Each structure stands twice: as C-alpha cells, then as structure tokens.
Amino acid sequence: MNNGLIKRVLTSIIISLFTFFFIIKGGIFFIIFLIFLFIISVSEWIKLCLNSFDIIFGILFLIISFLSAFKLHDTNLGYFILVILIAISSDIGGFVFGKIFKGPKLTRISPNKTYAGSLGGYFLSLITGAIFIKISDLLTIIPFDNFSKKYFFFIVFVSTINQLGDLTVSYFKRLKNISDTGNLLPGHGGLLDRIDGLIFVIPFSYIFYLFLL
C-alpha cells in the first residue's frame, strides 16, 4: 500500500468517525458541524468557478443542500444515515472496483472514472443499504419495513445522483484545469472533493423521501 493510499484510508476513517459523531449527537453540535462544512464548501466553490454566475448559482445550491441535510436529519435520522452510507459506499465501490478491474473510461470529464467503477458503486451501495436496513429492523432501532422494491430503487437513485454529482464537480475542476478543490484533506484534496456527490444527493433524497417513501 503506497503512502497516498494510506493517507486516503486514514483520512476517510477519521472523517467518518467525526461525521457520525456529529450526526448521532445532533442538536447544536450537528448545526455547528453543518455551518463549518458550509463555509469551507463555499470557499472552495468560489475558487473553483470561472464567472460570477457559477459562483452565485453554486452558493444558492449549497444553501439548499445544507438546509436539506438539516431537514432530513431532523425529520428522520434513520433515512439520513442510510443516505450517507449509500453515498460513502458508492464512492468506495467506485474507487475499489475501478482500481481492480480498470477497463473502459466512463467519460472524458473525469479520466479516472470507469464503467467498472460505476457498477462497483451501485453494487456496494446496494449491499451496504440492505445490511443497514436489515440490522435496523432486527435491533428495532430505526423503523424500516424490510428491504423492499422501493428501497432498492431508492439506493440505486441515490448512488446515481452521487456519481453525477462527482462528475459535475469534476467538470468544473477540468474547466479550471486543477485536480483538487483544495488541500484540506490529506489523500483526498479539498472538502468538495470528498462531499461532491453528497451535496447533490441530500436535496434530491429529501424530495424522494417526502414524496415517494
């Protein structure tokens, strides 16, 4: 395992521990956590943009995204955690399967993305989502009505949006001719490099939850 990969894995573990601490703690702790992430995200987005329209549109979208995160967390913690786990699994599955199987590139927007990685993202998301729902049912911690068709489509939907969000930020990085949105996170780059999918996943998942789940 090379130094870059070690840094990436260690950073991912630390980020995950901190994130789930604030998610489960909730209340003012979660609000402060969201504000902190929002400020950094806005800062990185401004540096990423080429014109004022992109800056304004992006900031408005980030406001919607972080407000949706607060609302979904406040409405149903179980679904919020499920969404986070799906997004994380989609990223990990994409990275691992892409590295192992390689194969044809998915798009020129992000040269590191492959069809194998995309399928791996779906695969690991479905496995993780099904396990989380099953464990939640067995322990009666979070009420899900078993892993059904609607959850299958929900997980595929979230993984799809996560991958599209990743590609969207990659597109803006390509326009700016940079590889990372920042250098805050060792092995990952900037915060937006880590949550690029999530900022798209959260608002769409909230809408999905309100009207279809």
Image: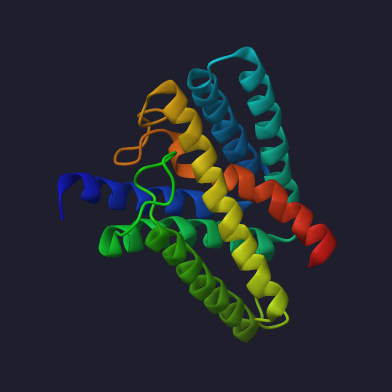
What residue is shown at x 76% (from left), y 58% (from top)? 208
Visual colour scheme: rainbow
Residue lying furthest right: 211
To which quarter of the image does residue 139 belong? bottom right
**In front here: 139 or 4?**
4
What residue is shown at x 65% (from left), y 33% (from top)? 62
- Residue 196: horizontal and vertical position, in percent? 52, 41
Residue lying furthest left: 2
Q: Is residue 90 left or right of residue 12?
A: right
Image position of 120 with respect to 192: above or below: below
To which quarter of the image does residue 117 belong? bottom left
What residue is shown at x 30% (from left), y 53% (from top)? 9
- Residue 98: horizontal and vertical position, in percent? 33, 58
**In front here: 125 or 139?**
125
**In front here: 24 or 57?**
57
Q: Is residue 144 visible?
A: no
Residue lying furthest bottom: 138
Q: Please state, as top left, top right, bottom left or bottom right, where the C terminus lies in the image.
A: bottom right
What residue is shown at x 39% (from left), y 50% (from top)? 113
Q: Is residue 46 left or right of residue 121?
A: right
- Residue 17: horizontal and vertical position, in percent? 43, 54
